[in-house]
Amino acid sequence: MGNTMPTPGRRRRRNPRKQDEQGEEREEQQREAEAEKLPCFTCEICIEPTPQDKKFKNKKRCSHPFCLDCISKFIDAKTDDNITAVKCPDLNCNKVLDPLSCRPILPARVFNKWCDLLCNATILKCERVYCPYPDCSELVLNECGGRVRKCECPNPNCKRLFCFRCKLPWHAGYRCDESGVTRDSNDLLIGQVVETKQWTRCPGCGHSVELLLGCPIVRCRCGTLFCHACGRKLSSHWCWCKRNLRNNLLFISLMLFVFFLLWMLLFRFRKFKA
């Protein structure tokens, strides 16, 4: 009789759920052990000892001892009061909390509400108009500041021009106080020619004046003196508008240079005569 090989016993299958639960318990125990090793601080809101990794960091703006949970609840309470600029909870600190630094610790509902409040506050600060065309009415903001007149609607389905000052469709070749006057197609075509040719209308009689070369201070045939660059009526031969400022500075520099040359010639003449 030959020796018989022992049949191997069946291996018991391990339950994957138990393995996952045991792995999670081990990881939690490791985290708790690591947290006990870390130095702790006392949160000034809840007065509880908290590990250093749970300390809120306001993007290096300030570093007061507050835990993440208290900051999250603090921001939630402030947004419920419609406060946009949420300041540090410390009584002696005026630093504003950074929304991007707070995003990981905030619920999505709180963060979205905070963003909506910030957007509304920004819109109220900016100069804003709505597109005057009835089929559009897109909100347009003057984010860069300064005086804006000719503006294009940012709506990709519109892209039409309008006047940012009088909030009416663009009136090429006409002033804002004349934009409400009903005109025919010929007047509109003339206005487009005036704008294309860069003519300036006289503030006295309203006739268009073309400047080919020379000084931008012109006198209309009606006798009105005005600046061809900005269209402003003048009482003297000077205009300090932004378009004419460079010419004025060049003229003043040239006059100073001529005066300096005359003074040098006079000084040398007197020295030679002596």
Image: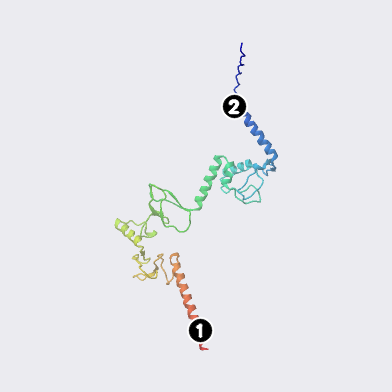
Amino acid tagged 2: Arg
Residue 20 position, x and y percent, is 60, 29
Q: Residue furthest front?
A: 1
Alpha carbon distance from label 1 to label 2: 105 Å
Is 76 situated left or right of 146 in this image? right
In the depicted structure, whether residue 274 falls above or below residue 98: below
Look at 48% across and 79% down and name the residue there.
261
Q: What residue did someone put label 1 on?
A: 268
Amino acid tagged 1: Arg
Q: Residue furthest left?
A: 186
Q: Nearer the viewer, residue 105 or 112?
A: 105
Badge 2 element: helix
Look at 63% across and 42% down and name the residue there.
68
Look at 67% across and 38% down and name the residue there.
34
Task: Please tell me in which quadrant of the rendered image residue 74 appears.
Answer: top right
In the depicted structure, whether residue 160 falls above or below residue 195: above
Is 150 situated left or right of 81 in this image? left
Residue 159 position, x and y percent, is 39, 50
Q: What residue did someone put label 2 on?
A: 17
Residue 155 position, x and y percent, is 41, 48
Q: Residue furthest bottom?
A: 274
In the rendered structure, which disc, 1 or 2, sits on the residue that comes first in sequence? Answer: 2
Structural crowding at the residue carrying mark 2, measured as other residues with C-alpha within 10 Å and reported as few (<14), some (14–19) or many (≥20): few
Residue 226 position, x and y percent, is 39, 68
Badge 1 element: helix
**Marks 1 and 2 in Cβ contact (< 8 Å):** no
> Image quadrant for the N terminus?
top right
Is 172 situated left or right of 127 in this image? left
Q: Nearer the viewer, residue 224 or 192?
A: 192
Look at 45% across and 67% down and name the residue there.
246
Q: Which mark is residue 73?
A: none
Q: How is the image coloured?
A: rainbow
